[in-house]
Amino acid sequence: MSVSASTPPHTTGAVEHVAIIMDGNGRWATNRGWPRLVGHRKGAERVKQIVSAAPEMGIKWLTIYAFSTENWKRSTEEVLGLMAIFARYIQREADRMAAEGVRMRFIGDRTRLDPKLQRLMAGIEARTAGFSRLNLTVAINYGGRDEILRATRALAREVAEGRLDPADVTEAAISARLDTAGIPDPELVIRTSGETRTSNFLVWQSSYAEYEFTPTLWPDFGPQELADILARFGNRHRRFGGVSAE
């Protein structure tokens, strides 16, 4: 399933692609007097629960924001701890994802990541490539502006080398060079923790998405709240700039 960036993904209340900004792990732990990494580990457990529940809710594509290009500003201890959590998650969840028919892939600039983590990422992508019950996309070292910058640089090189006519630089051409090429745009973006900004997440892809901001911290965000949000989404009438016939 592929959706052009210029075409709204759906005009009905159905939702197949949900993107989530998983925010609040550190605050969840701090509120309890625990180290921030405890909250991140709890957040990883919540990811497993949501991944297991999503297909039963009709979700076919789930994209989660795990680590942004700005998150390198955090302490070395927290960054290294997060990278260890990512590696552990991949190693421990590979069998379960394969058993549940989950395809896992990653978006973002991998060049700054530890080579061992890069190998683990490539390995689980290859192992789960044939599955489609749920398409799980994890954004690591990802930023929407960085993604667009890398895509436009690729286009510029093709034009400079004479392999692409400038007139062919269309929205579809840009979409095809994004990290999410071949992945449909999200209909719904959820952010937890009470913050009401998009934090450079899927800047291009979410232009037609509906947003839901919840005060719930990510470690407390469960399947029931996701189901409630999906129910509210189903009642929205999405016109995409048109005029309602009602």
Image (cartoon, rainbow, N blue to C red):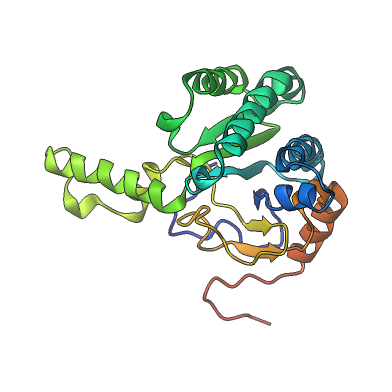
Q: Where is residue 197 in the image (x, y as percent from the top left)?
A: 58, 65
Q: Where is residue 154 in the image (x, y as percent from the top left)?
A: 27, 41
Which residue corresponds to the image point at 64% horizontal and 67% vertical from the top-left?
196
Q: Which residue is drawn at 72% across and 25% down?
A: 101
Residue 233 location, quadrant: bottom right
Instruction: Tell me the quadrant of the picture where the N terminus can be found.
Output: top right
Q: Describe residue 209's horizontal placement relative to residue 230 as left or right.
A: left
Where is the C terminus found, in terms of image quarters?
A: bottom right
User: Horizontally, is 143 left or right of 187 in the view?
Assistant: left
Residue, far right: 224
Q: Which of 174 and 143 is in front in this view?
A: 143
Q: Picture quarter containing residue 134? A: top right
Q: Where is residue 193 in the image (x, y as percent from the top left)?
A: 73, 59
Seen at 29% across and 48% down, the residue is 152
Is residue 204 toward the left or the right of residue 227 in the image? left
Q: In this view, does 49 lie above or below 212?
A: above
- What is the number of callouts on the image? 0
**Nearest to the observer: residue 30 or residue 63:** 30
Q: Position of residue 119 (x, y in %)?
A: 51, 18
